[in-house]
Image (cartoon, rainbow, N blue to C red):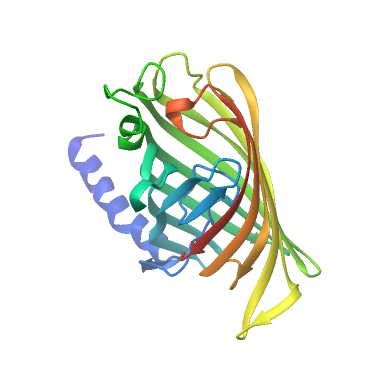
Amino acid sequence: MNFKKIFIYALFILAIVPNILFSQTQFEFLPDGLNFLPLRANSQEAKLGVLYYPENANLKVDIGNTMDLLSFQFPESKSKLNFGIEFMAYASVIGYEQLRLQIDAVDGFFGGNATFSKPINDNLLSFRLRFIHNSAHLVDGNYWVHPYPRGWTKPGGPIPFTRDFAELIAANTINLENYNLRYYGGGAFSLRIRPDNLKRFSATAGFEINNDKIIGKLFNKPVNVFLVHNISYAGLPDYSFTNQSQLGIKFGKWESKGILFYFSFYSGNNMFGEYFDERINKVGFGFAVDFP
């Protein structure tokens, strides 16, 4: 086959295949909502809120959001493929001297994701593949609370902590009478790690269940009672389990914007990368705002 024929066939494929694909696809730029809601009990998700720990009056402050940019909808299969971005960070607040928040440590995350969803009978099967850069840092509060001469409160000072990881999560959402249940599981592989004693593979699983009939409505908006739990298995540096549970209420639709108040229990490796090898148990009370 000569080059001329190859060129003609290539032009034919380039002209016909996209037409076939897009004739069966509906495209939307900046779609409303999210194709895959962030995992409520997973620390490494985009959130906006504050978690208060009464034991020592410390705070965990979450700032971030995830947004779907492109959506491809396939009417015949009722499936949807979205592409989005994620930017978030959470900070450890250890004091309020002179009304100044003393930030001890910060973990930052940014990256992108591809999400796919497809209804199957009364279920909604969904997948999320995301690529995230995570880095951890000590901040001014860890330095300035130390008496003169100034130095880092954390023994040894800051460590270079980085994880660039790819993560795939599969989830299934079902309706059980008045309850909405999503259960999920998946794993991640870190392409780049610092320090080098971190393990590259990790896994996570969990469930989220909510009911908007127990309390009813407030100002004509549903009030959801929810229970969520996330368990992760990671090598930090030795493989171990970390559990986090939340019980609370959300004012507003579960998949839409709303205000949340909840009780939290956390047990496992410290969620802040600068203290990754510490094992902790924390009970807290949280407030968050959803705006997917």
Q: Quadrant of residue 78?
A: bottom right
Q: Residue lying farthest top?
A: 197
Q: From where the camera sits, is residue 3 visible? A: yes
Front residue of 107 and 46: 107
Check the image and report above or below for 3 versus 9: above
What residue is drawn where x is 34% and y is 50%?
98
Q: Which quarter of the image is occupied by the N terminus?
A: top left
Q: Residue lying farthest right?
A: 177
Whole-percent x, y for residue 104 in the image = 39, 36
> Residue 7 vs residue 163: left or right?
left
What residue is drawn where x is 61% and y is 41%?
55
Check the image and report above or below for 213 versus 175: below
What residue is drawn where x is 49% and y is 42%?
44
Q: From where the camera sits, is residue 256 visible? A: no
What residue is drawn where x is 37% and y is 27%?
162
> Residue 266 vs residue 93: left or right?
right
Front residue of 9 and 231: 231
Whole-percent x, y for residue 15 in the image = 28, 57
Whole-percent x, y for residue 171 in the image = 63, 49
Q: Residue lying farthest bottom?
A: 220
Number of callouts = 0
Front residue of 203 and 281: 281
Whole-percent x, y for residue 80 in the image = 51, 60
> Residue 30 vs residue 281: left or right?
left
Q: Residue lying farthest left?
A: 4
Front residue of 179 and 221: 221
Check the image and report above or below for 170 versus 72: above
